[in-house]
Image (tube, rainbow, N blue to C red):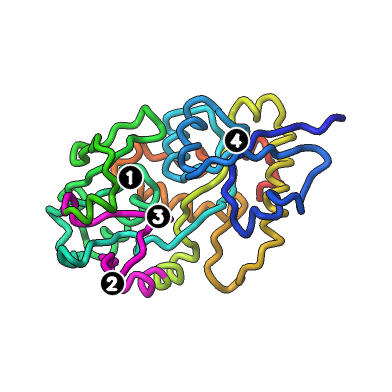
């Protein structure tokens, strides 16, 4: 039997490195990696036209894809999690913004649907009782799932000016940034005790806020479900080789039951922010993957 090839987009993490450097392989499939930088540029092509067979996908995009019946199958794999409270920053020379003063302020975020933004808003609601509709949200990008429309309290900016420049120039009062957080003491976290709060949140909930999961194209699943099962096993094997403190926060997670609580929490957070037109159940979210993976997904 010939080896099957799956076009694949995955970031390089400690738990995916063994796949990408060829340390972990399968006689049945080959993962043909496509490098997309930043990785979020792969999300829209994936959910709109199945551009890849297997693709990393932000959880908000993935949940919207399920609800809007886009041609992707969400697998029970988390490849990226991150503590988020420190991602909301202000610019010290223009005055440090306090969490209790955010109502009426202008906050820039790449997209209202960006998963980091979703988690920051969730934490602000949880920690400080923020009414997110009272904030002037300014975005550059729309949703990866094009059927979704932003709430009325979100404004779109068509300029090419980046969020950091807008923050420096006073166009916005605060910004939500992820891996592109700027360096320098002039940029100040709005939530001063973010690390302490994040760790306390993890102790309470038992998981890190999910950023990215993994999805398979519906067409690939229909054509060859066995190759998707093999890809799942490869990803799990690669993660098993990564060093992680079992008693501390772990950025990856596998399995339907292991992900039930984290995904249910995330669905609730999305519903509170108007990110989903209806509430899907966790069973609905994972039903197509369960049909493919069977007991191997637990």
Which numbered tag is attached to residue 74? none
Point 29% across, 46% down: residue: 162
Above or below for 279 versus 217: below
At x 59% / y 45%, what residue is drawn? Answer: 10
**Residue denoted by label 1:** 110
In contact (CB < 8 Å): disc 4 and disc 2: no
Foreground disc of the pair 1, 2 = 1
Is 73 on the left-hand or right-hand side of 265?
Answer: right
Q: Position of residue 38 (x, y in %)?
A: 48, 45
State how far apart marks 4 and 2 are (Cα).
Answer: 39 Å
Q: Secondary structure at mark 2?
A: loop
x then y, percent, for residue 85: 34, 63
Q: Is residue 194 left or right of residue 102?
A: right
> Is residue 172 inside the magenta stretch?
yes
SS class of the residue under badge 1?
Answer: strand
What is the crowding at mark 1: few (fewer than 14 residues within 10 Å), some, or many (at least 20)? Answer: many
Q: Which mark is residue 216?
A: 4
Q: Could you tell which of marks 1 and 4 lies nearer the N-terminus?
A: 1
Query: Secondary structure of the magenta portion, mostly?
Result: loop
Residue drawn 42% across the image and 53% down it: 265
Name the quadrant of the N terminus: top right
Q: Which residue is mark 2?
A: 192
- Left or right: where does residue 143 sit relative to residue 14? left
Say which label, 3 or 1, has the lower sequence index.
1
- SS of the residue under disc 4: strand
């Amino acid at each position: 039997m010939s080896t099957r090839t799956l076009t694949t987009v995955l970031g390089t993490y400690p738990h995916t490195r063994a796949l990408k450097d060829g340390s972990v392989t399968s006689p049945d499939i080959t993962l043909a990696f496509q490098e997309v930088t930043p990785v979020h540029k792969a999300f829209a092509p994936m959910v709109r036209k199945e551009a890849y067979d297997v693709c990393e996908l932000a959880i908000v995009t993935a949940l919207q894809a399920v609800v809007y019946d886009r041609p992707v199958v969400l697998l029970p794999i988390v490849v990226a999690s991150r503590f988020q409270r420190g991602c909301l920053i202000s610019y010290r020379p223009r005055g440090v913004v306090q969490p209790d003063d955010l109502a009426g302020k202008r906050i820039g975020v790449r997209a209202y649907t960006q998963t980091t933004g979703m988690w920051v808003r969730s934490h602000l609601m949880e920690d400080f009782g923020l009414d997110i509709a009272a904030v002037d949200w300014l975005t550059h990008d729309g949703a990866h799932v094009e059927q979704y429309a932003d709430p009325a309290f979100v404004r779109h900016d068509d300029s090419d000016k980046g969020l950091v420049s807008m923050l420096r120039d006073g166009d916005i009062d605060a910004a939500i940034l992820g891996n592109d957080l700027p360096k320098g003491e002039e940029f100040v976290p709005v939530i001063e005790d973010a690390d302490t709060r994040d760790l306390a949140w993890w102790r309470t909930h038992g998981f890190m806020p999910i950023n990215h999961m993994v999805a398979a194209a519906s067409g690939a699943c229909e054509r060859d479900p066995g190759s998707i099962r093999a890809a799942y096993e490869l990803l799990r094997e690669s993660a098993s080789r990564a060093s992680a403190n079992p008693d501390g926060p772990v950025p990856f997670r596998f399995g339907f039951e292991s992900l039930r609580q984290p995904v249910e929490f995330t669905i609730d957070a999305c519903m509170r922010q108007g990110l989903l037109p209806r509430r899907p159940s966790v069973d609905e979210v994972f039903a197509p993957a369960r049909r493919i993976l069977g007991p191997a997904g637990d």
